[in-house]
Amino acid sequence: MTGGPEPISAVAREAFERELAQLRTDRAAVAATLRGGKEVGDQADQADELQRASELDRLDRRITGIEGRLREAAVAEPPGTDTVGVGSTVKVRFADGTESTVQLGELATALDRTLVTADSPLGRALLGRRAGDTVAYETPQGPTRTVVLAIGDDAS
């Protein structure tokens, strides 16, 4: 996103930690069903064993990814105020003239209506921008433009 460790919001950290706990529970349940190299019966049993092993691999990859992201966030500096990055608070003016203050994050949540995810069209357009920049991005209604008015404390 910005090249260095990216901060995450408290809401995103909690969501990652909940997901991690669930993944670990799921992993334990799947691992308990594997036969661990013992002779497997017919082809259906072999296919089922292979499917469970694939699921275990998928769970392990996601667990590793989340653990890495949480470690990275633990050493990240707070978001800067010169350019927009993950964790930045940004005041923008939309094409219709309305202004809004949003926070750039990485996990969408229904509880936080001001969050814009970094992988959304607006989020991608805002990353790396500075106050005064005009950004273009696609919406379901077509292309539009937004002006970055302020970043960080000035955006409140």
Image (tube, grey):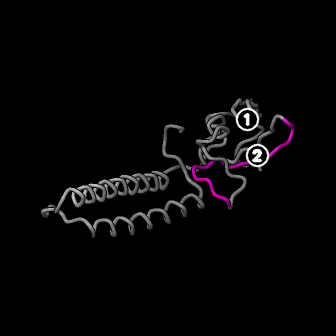
Secondary structure state at the residue bearing disc 1:
loop
Q: How many marks?
A: 2
Above or below 20: residue 101: above
Left-right relation of 115 to 66 = right
Secondary structure state at the residue bearing disc 2:
helix
In space, the residues marked 2 and 1 are separated at their CA atoms by: 10 Å
Q: Residue, x 51% and y 50% (percent of image)?
A: 76
Residue 6, how many percent across, how many down?
Answer: 52, 47
Name the amino acid type tagged 1: Ala
Above or below 29: residue 10: above
Above or below 136: residue 87: below
Left-right relation of 129 to 145 = left
Along the line of sight, the residue nearer the viewer: 37 or 12: 37
Question: Residue lying farthest right?
Answer: 97
Q: Earlier in the sequence, mark 2 or mark 1?
A: 1
Along the line of sight, the residue nearer the viewer: 15 or 90: 15
Q: Residue, x 39% and y 66% (percent of image)?
A: 26
- Mark number, residue 154: 2
Along the line of sight, the residue nearer the viewer: 154 or 94: 94
Q: Residue, x 33% and y 68% (percent of image)?
A: 28
Residue 41, how many percent across, how many down?
Answer: 16, 62
Residue 54, how many percent across, how many down?
Answer: 31, 53
Residue stretch rendered in magenta on the structure: 96-110
- Mark number, residue 131: 1
